[in-house]
Amino acid sequence: MESSSELDRLHFFEQACKISEATYASNPLDADNLTRWVGALLELSQFQSVPDSQKMIQDAISKLEEALSINPKKHDALWCLGNAQTSFAFLTNKEDEARPYFEKAAQYFQQAVDEDPSNEIYLKSLEISTSKGRRRYGVIECDPLVRKGLEKTVSIWEQNE
């Protein structure tokens, strides 16, 4: 049985996905919304079976690529794309199959650092992704700015219900 805080977290990110989906329907060119949506998807993927999690992460990657087609220099989307690639790599059983995902993640983290060189989260993610011992690290959490945007969106949505 999941703890109350895990259920609250699950509910929060499910609501964030619903809100982002509705926002996308009215404004598909909102790169910030796509990035928030992905943050929620990546968090929700942690509650899924491996195949469902992989499918959810692939959906997240697709949405991030869409966000980057709207704004190619969107550093938080680049960073989230690195996280999505890392998460997918961790769900891959074979080292040789996981390696390309880790390599892509490092490239995206580098691009995020290039766009925002003073962001310590991006720098740490890049450091972790390029270290030889990266498998010892767990899932990298949602960017605090993305999480803040999700919390604000959910709060506004809940007030309007």
Image (tube, grey):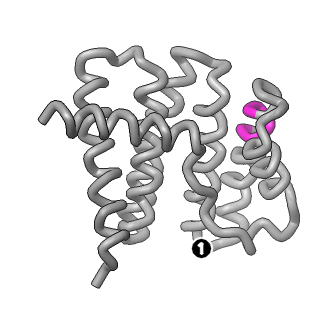
On the image, the x and y values in percent for residue 130 come to 85, 54
Of residues 63 and 40, the one drawn nearer to the viewer in this rendering: 40
The answer to which quarter of the image holds residue 55 is bottom left
Q: Quadrant of residue 44?
A: bottom left
Residue 148 vs residue 86, the one in the foreground: 148
| Secondary structure under the numbered disc 1 in the rendered image | loop
How far from the left and from the top, in percent, is residue 68? 56, 23
Region of the chain picked out in magenta, as a range: 108-112
Image position, residue 108 (x, y; %): 71, 38
| 111 is within the stretch colored magenta | yes
Q: Quadrant of residue 43?
A: bottom left
Q: Is residue 53 magenta?
A: no
Whether 158 is drawn above or below 141: the answer is above
Tag 1: residue type?
Asn
Furthest-front residue in this view: 159
Along the line of sight, the residue nearer the viewer: 77 or 105: 77
Residue at image coords 46%, 47%: 58
Q: Is residue 28 above or below residue 61?
A: above
Residue positioned 55% across, 67% down in the render: 91
Vertical position of residue 24 compared to residue 158: above or below: above
User: Which SS type dominates the magenta stretch?
Assistant: helix
Give percent across and percent down for residue 118.
83, 33
The quarter of the picture where the N terminus appears is bottom left
- Disc 1: which residue: 93
